[in-house]
């Protein structure tokens, strides 16, 4: 596996490889890798000649500076895992490589409705930061295929919108890969490393609450199911940002059941200062 830290070096290298006819698949991450990340790497590797993974803890997407400071960093272990998963190219830039002109960008990405709900509502500025970093990474890597996790459902929709806004939708194919879970259902996440034993025991309750809603779709009004789930999570010690039942393709909240509507059930909740998110679709 080749380790590259400079944006220009990576860009030139990949340009040459693509000229030779090589195909490229890209997995952007913030590190502290787990099996969920590795599943994206393996899929990218199996579908492209060159699999590129980046690790960059992007300061501009953290609306809470304390969360940024506490974000887990495990580079040595990450490198081993990437090598084992068959990653070809590992991009590990400094902040100055990604933001040579600083982080105070004037560009605003017009995300519209998507930015006003759920993660957009509870983490103001988060998706602008996500767009900033993904735009820059896509300029550097220029991949043919991009691999994202369904774990970050709304982020996938934001990035789909981004590539349209930056006129890359024809050039980059987005692949959304299923959420990998621990045996007890907890969605794998870098933030899970921060959970202590007692918190780790409670954490699967988020997935269970979503499963409960899924099992009861149509049996009671959506509002009631959401309220029941919130009450249950609060009872178990969570502080809940949201439980939402939404249309899977638009993320519009559902206020009454419609037949054959694909739904996504989403949750964000804190265990003390650790914020966890999860979602499931009614088709899965
Ligand atoms: P992150 O390092 O958290 O920014 O995530 C990097 C990529 O991995 C994103 O596309 C995430 O959606 C994806 N990802 C994170 N957790 C999981 C998971 N449990 N299963 C599948 N993909 C995931």
Image (cartoon, rainbow, N blue to C red):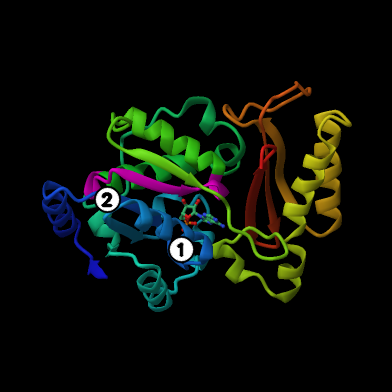
**Residue at 35% across, 51% down:** 47
Q: Which mark is residue 190?
A: none
Q: Residues within 10 Å of mark 1 (few under 14, many from 20)?
A: many
The N terminus - image quarter: bottom left
Q: In terms of image quadrants, where is residue 186? A: bottom right
**Residue at 36% across, 46% down:** 146
Q: Is residue 98 above or below residue 173?
A: below
In the image, is residue 78 part of the stretch drawn in magenta?
A: no
In this figure, which residue is indicated by the disc labeled 1? 38
In this figure, which residue is indicated by the disc labeled 2? 24
Q: Work out how far the residue at label 2 is from the one at label 1, CA to CA, in angstroms.
A: 17 Å
Q: Is residue 278 above or below residue 109?
A: below
- Residue 65 seen by the camera: yes
- Residue 125 seen by the camera: no
Q: In the drawing, does residue 271 fall left or right of residue 38?
A: right
Part of the protein shown in magenta: 139-152
Element at label 2: strand
In the image, is residue 144 part of the stretch drawn in magenta?
A: yes
């Amino acid at each position: 596996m080749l380790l590259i830290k400079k944006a220009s070096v990576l860009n030139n290298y990949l340009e040459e490889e693509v000229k030779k006819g090589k195909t490229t698949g890209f997995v952007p991450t913030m590190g502290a890798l787990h099996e969920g990340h590795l599943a994206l790497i393996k899929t990218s590797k199996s579908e492209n000649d060159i699999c590129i993974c980046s690790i960059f803890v992007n300061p501009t997407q953290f609306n809470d500076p304390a969360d940024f400071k506490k974000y887990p960093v495990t580079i040595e272990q990450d490198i081993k895992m990437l090598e084992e998963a068959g990653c070809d190219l590992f991009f590990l830039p400094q902040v100055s490589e990604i933001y040579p002109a600083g982080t105070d960008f004037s560009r605003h990405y017009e995300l519209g409705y998507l930015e006003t709900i759920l993660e957009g509502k509870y983490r103001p500025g988060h998706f602008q930061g996500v767009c900033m970093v993904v735009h820059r990474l896509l300029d550097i890597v220029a991949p043919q295929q991009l691999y994202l996790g369904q774990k970050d459902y709304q982020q996938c929709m934001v990035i789909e919108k981004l590539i349209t806004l930056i006129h890359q939708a024809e050039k980059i194919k987005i692949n959304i890969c299923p959420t990998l879970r621990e045996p007890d259902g907890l969605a794998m996440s870098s933030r899970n490393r921060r959970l202590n034993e007692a918190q780790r025991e409670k954490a699967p309750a988020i997935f269970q609450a979503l499963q409960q809603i899924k099992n009861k779709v149509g049996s009671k009004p959506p509002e009631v199911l959401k309220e029941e789930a919130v009450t249950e999570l609060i009872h178990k010690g969570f502080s809940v940002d949201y439980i939402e039942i939404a249309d899977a393709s638009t993320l519009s909240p559902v206020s009454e059941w419609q037949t054959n509507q694909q739904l996504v059930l989403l949750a964000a909740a804190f265990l003390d200062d650790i914020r966890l998110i999860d979602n499931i679709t009614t088709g899965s």
